[in-house]
Amino acid sequence: MLQILLGAISLGLLWAVMTIGVYITYRILDIADLSVEGSIAMGAAIAASLIYSGMNPFAASCIALFGGMGAGLVTGLLHTKLKIPALLSGILTMIALYSVNLRIMGKANLSLLRMDTVYTKFEEFGLNHSSAVILFGLVCVIGVVGILYWFFGTEIGSAIRATGNNAQMARAQGINTNNMIILGLVISNGLVALCGALIAQSQSFADVQMGIGSIVIGLASVIIGEVLFGKKNFFTRLLSLVLGAITYRVIIALVLKMGMPANDLKMFTALTVAIALSLPVFRSYLIPFKKSIKGEL
């Protein structure tokens, strides 16, 4: 049981990077960006291909980050310059990235068995694979949370947040909202691609279809984090995203341990997100019901 929990925590820390990326578009910019399903696979494809060719895994992961930023730039340009709706822009980028990822890897999947990864250095100190992933994932998450907390407190970061809150008011203040949307999408997809690179190295392979359903996983982690751990201020929200991603992976591990078929995981995740998103509606139904009961008493 301990090994299962350690594996879930290690995966949760890696997926937390992707969850933060989804949060930037979904909550801060108020955009449902489906291009992340292609970006996460793109990050895995770039890192796996470069590591397979002999490049340093840390350098390969950084290049994967920039590859994801490029994907976000394409989505942003489609939306802001060509006036294609944000949802459709993400879908177009996601579809195009499927072919791009096949080109990068040269085949549908690529194995990294017996290859050095970012976790190898930690394993050389005697740590097992799960512990190495947890340690490196924790370092990455702390770095990402710290950098983003600083960045979104700057003038540019505040402009991105203002654009998501009220685009018309932001434009009235002289903010170029199109540029802010593009920048937000670039940062988001860069983080998602970095997550894909780290996951590929953790599981020792990259697959062109590994991004399917990742947006739902990201949304589930965002919602679980907000519901369970609160959202008092921006720093608290960032921490709640990390805890939400870990909690989601622990829930999945426990559900699998209880005997749920692995084929039903996508459906379980979709139902979890649907229920979580519907909580305000259920609450609105319950409030009048509670008031009527108190009135009768």
Image (cartoon, rainbow, N blue to C red):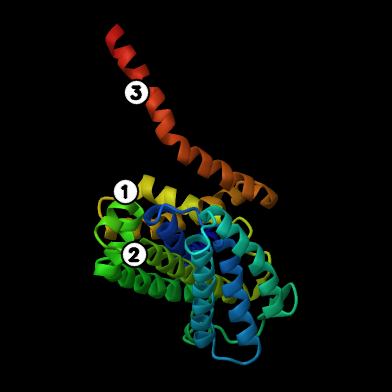
Q: In which quadrant is the C terminus drawn?
A: top left
The residue drawn where x is 52% and y is 73% is: 68
| Dot 3 or dot 1, earlier in sequence | 1
Residues at badges 3 and 1 in contact (C-beta under 8 Å)?
Answer: no
Q: Where is residue 195 shown, x and y percent of the image? A: 51, 70
In the figure, 66 relative to 77: above or below?
below
Q: Which residue is mark 3?
A: 287
Q: Between residues 131 and 108, which one lies in front from this camera angle?
A: 108
Q: Between residues 54 and 127, which one lies in front from this camera angle?
A: 54
Please identify the quarter of the rendering in which residue 247 is found. Answer: bottom left
Please identify the quarter of the rendering in which residue 114 is found. Answer: bottom right
Type of amino acid at the residue the image marks with label 2: Asn
Apparent side of residue 209 relative to residue 47 in the rendered image (left or right): right
Q: Which residue is mark 1?
A: 230
Apparent side of residue 172 relative to residue 10 in the rendered image (left or right): left
Residues at badges 2 and 1 in contact (C-beta under 8 Å)?
Answer: no
Type of amino acid at the residue the image marks with label 1: Gly
Name the residue furthest top.
296
In the figure, 121 relative to 83: above or below?
below
Report, in whole angstroms, how far the alpha carbon at label 3 lies from the one at label 1: 21 Å
| Dot 3 or dot 2, earlier in sequence | 2
Depth check, mark 3 against mark 2: the one in front is 2
Mark 1 residue crowding within 10 angstroms, few (<14) / some (14–19) / many (20+): some
| Dot 2 or dot 1, earlier in sequence | 2
Figure disc tally: 3
Dot 3 falls on a residue whose secondary structure is helix
- Residue 269 appears anywhere in the view: yes
